[in-house]
Image: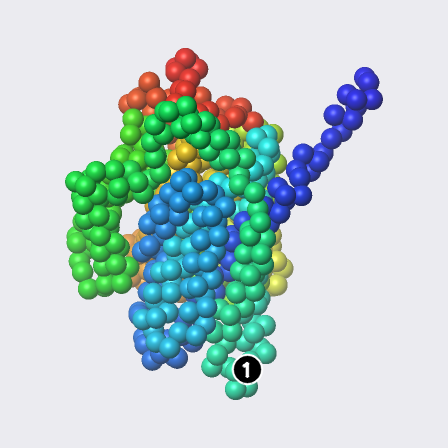
Amino acid sequence: MSNVEATTVKRSWRDELTGTQWKSFWAAWIGYLLDGFDFVMITLVLTEVGRTFHVGAALTATLVSAAFIARWFGGLLLGAIGDRVGRKEAMVLSILLYAGGSVVCAIAPAFWVIFLARVCIGMGMAGEYGSSATYVIESWPVRLRNKASGFLISGYSIGAGVTAQVYALIEHLTRGTSAEPYTWRILFALGIIPIVLALWLRRALPEASDFAKMREEQEARAAAGETVEKTDMFTILFARTPKRSVVNIVLALAAFGSLIVIYLFDSKVSGFVLALLWIVVAAVMVSFMVQFEGPRWPTGVAVMITVFVAFLYSWPLQALLPTYYRQTLGLASDTASNLVTATSFGAAAGCIMAGFIGDKFGTRKAYWTSLLISEVLVLPVFLISRDMVHSSVAWIVLLGVFIFVQQMFGQGIAGLLPKFISNYFPVEKRAAGLGFSYNVGALGGAIAPVLGISLAGDPATGVGGVLPSSWGLGWTLFILSFAFTAVIIILIGINFPYRMQKLFGPGHVRSADRMDQADDEFAPSDNPDVGTASK
């Protein structure tokens, strides 16, 4: 072997990345860190916010739901900006929306002001999932794009993991002082520090390489006298024809109205009405995706369904494990916080692992294999009972180890989700395709904890649920997690989006839809590889 060949073999994947590519990664990673920080923080400060504005628990809980009301539209709008103007510009707008919402939350004079700020934050975070993920994936070398995806999503888990510790520290420092009533405002204000850093990093970034190449090709076509049609999602839905625009505005308002009733007034309407409202929301989202994707609508709809189920399998544990630790197992708040941190850090470690195995074995194979391992690991988590954790601290430590490893293979592998989604959309539609489908799928995350509590009943006693009270919250979480994970294993294992496209629109299958190779290049939208797809 020659010296040149030896050098090539020993070359590390880090050597393939430039300083600018790492800078783009960290600029986006901070956004995901903020999302994790915000998600956990708002649940921790609800009591203090309610006390400040003299509102009850039911109303303060709407601050968590507020972000979900607008996330789907944030993914659509900011994704469209990313596809039409540029990924970098959409990234900056996303973080500015988040920053504005955080500042307003910190100084909000009334409850309705903080509610509107939470809606703004939700839109900004939705934009992060479309523009930032797309930017980093398109900026990194093709064979490292699973690492780009997994490493990026680890920011969310780390942000969620440190939040409880930051909250405990600020609460300790302000306890008994004149600053104690302002603890929750201080936490919102602290979030502005990483926002400033993210804006500074993003200010001078070059455009993502895939998008820059696409833009050059479009400009060359335009210079040759060819008409280049605008294909961003907002233009297709709201600016193509007057009739379509009016119809889609009405549909968007119907979706907004339905989600407002679902999240804010669910206790005042019957289950039948709620079911109808969810059907309205689903119909609107499917309609928008069908219009956006045209002949590739089977792929777009199948991606949304896959992401929705992915949230259903992961969020029962994400949202309800803290409740399980505190109320079902009866652990002290500091012990529960430490277990929440172990849960989040396990997911973060899994995101890093996902990047490596995704690049080595391919996105889909790595995804479903890791989930299959997590199915085996989820049972030991719930075999540790209340009596056991109160008999010896060793059982608590063992529980922490079990949940760390289970989340590593179960939740952490979801770090490949942005890469998985982006494969199905061409460059000119990728930011909105990723942002919209991801944030519509996130509605599954909103349903999951409600479904869990409905089945389990009271977390401490198990009374009032659909399932037998002896099962409790623990076994309910096990059933939900195991069942929905099995479904997502099947959907990813058979490549559900590709199968749907092959069934309903075989003439518009793209070679990238198959994702059989670890380093599949993204195929252009106007050059479907029908021969390859039909094998």
The relative height of residue 201 versus residue 81 in the rendered view (above or below) is below
Query: Could you tell me which quadrant the C terminus lies in?
Result: top left
How many marks on residues?
1
- The kind of secondary structure element at disc 1 is loop
Residue 314 placement (x, y as % from top left): 44, 47
Q: Which residue is mark 1?
A: 175
- 174 vs 7, left or right, is left
Query: Could you tell me which quadrant the N terminus lies in?
Result: top right
Residue drawn at the location 52% of the way across and 82% of the way down: 179
Residue 169 placement (x, y as % from top left): 59, 72
Q: Residues within 10 Å of mark 1 (few under 14, many from 20)?
A: few
Q: Nearer the viewer, residue 8 or 391?
A: 8
Residue drawn at the location 47% of the way across and 43% of the way down: 87
Residue drawn at the location 59% of the way across and 33% of the way down: 141
Q: Nearer the viewer, residue 227 or 128?
A: 227
- 215 vs 234, left or right, is right
- Coloring applied to the structure: rainbow
Residue 263 placement (x, y as % from top left): 28, 59
The relative height of residue 93 versus residue 422 in the rendered view (above or below) is below
Q: Amino acid at mark 1?
A: Arg
Q: Nearer the viewer, residue 270 or 60?
A: 60
- 203 vs 535, left or right, is right
Q: Is residue 214 visible?
A: no
Residue at the right extreme, as displayed:
3
Residue 488 placement (x, y as % from top left): 41, 37
Residue drawn at the location 17% of the way across and 58% of the way down: 270
Q: Is residue 90 visible?
A: yes
Res 432 quadrant in image:
top left
Res 463 quadrant in image:
bottom left
Res 247 quadrant in image:
top left
